[in-house]
Amino acid sequence: MKFDTYLTEGMQEAAREVTPDPALRTRVLAQARAAKPSRLTRRTRVVATLAAVLCLATGAALANSPVVSLVSGWMPDASYTSIADEARMEAKLGYDVRLPEALTEDFTLTEYEVEPVSMRDSANHEVGSYLTLCATYRKGDERVYLNAARTEDEPASDTLSDKTLVETREVDGVTVTYREIPTACLPADSTEDFTAEQYAAEERGEMFLSVGSAEYEETIYQTAGFELDGVAYSIGMHDSMADWSSEDFFTAAQTVIEAE
């Protein structure tokens, strides 16, 4: 079964968060800590050299695939702020996507970009790459993200526990799955480590562990995912980013599904 994708803010505003999702993808947009050796078995810390230290998800290995992490990068002339640029974006992306001007009445599209994603094996060697869309919707300081990627491009993963599943609903004939995933993030320069219980929960697909925050943080990652016309979509955020209920996510999913 294909699950959602990581949602990130990309590289606009100098430094923005990297957030995990049910596909257990690791998207790195900055330099991760190098003080501790990498554990590239069931989880990974991938290093990318950009300006800021961001939160990097360490998730479990992707099922039935040599890919254990995905690293998103940056490409020139691939960031947009107007819906009028959608045709140019899709030409660069290489496939059509549904990109509404607003996800809900108050959360409107402010920026979006095409991101290259590098698929890495356990030795951190690239074994493939593809392009995704990452769009940001805002209401004041609150924000939520929409990601899209062709289902044929992304490695499949069945590693999330049903404990993260809150509700599955049919929306206009499309199956939408809403999940809430506990996450913990350590500072990039921390001398501490996650507990054995946290690592065990990550192995069971019950939570995400990350590295790169300013201080130790625990949040709930909320995400609604679905597939439509060969494209996997996910709408998501950490619960600290906006005050959304599950109903808000299903409403936003319906908006994307009905978009032209």
Image (tube, grey):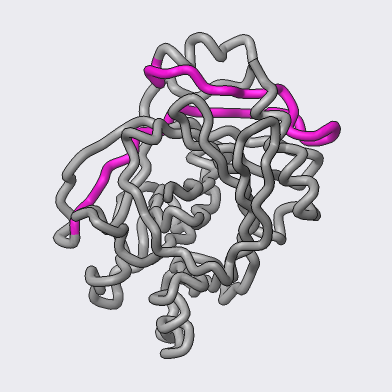
Q: Nearer the viewer, residue 176 or 35?
A: 176
Residue at 47% over, 80% down = 201
Residue at 49% over, 69% down = 161
Q: Nearer the viewer, residue 144 or 229?
A: 229
Tally of numbered discs: 0
Q: Quadrant of residue 216?
A: bottom right
Q: Does 233 appear in magenta? A: no
Q: Which residues are magenta?
A: 92-121
Residue at 65% over, 52% down = 168
Left or right: residue 124 compared with residue 86: left
- Looking at the figure, which quarter contains the C terminus? top right
Left or right: residue 109 compared with residue 37: right
Q: Quadrant of residue 100?
A: top right
Residue at 18% over, 61% down = 122
Tell me residue 123's x, y (percent): 14, 60
Tell me residue 160's x, y (percent): 46, 64
Q: Does 113 appear in magenta? A: yes
Tell me residue 74's x, y (percent): 38, 34
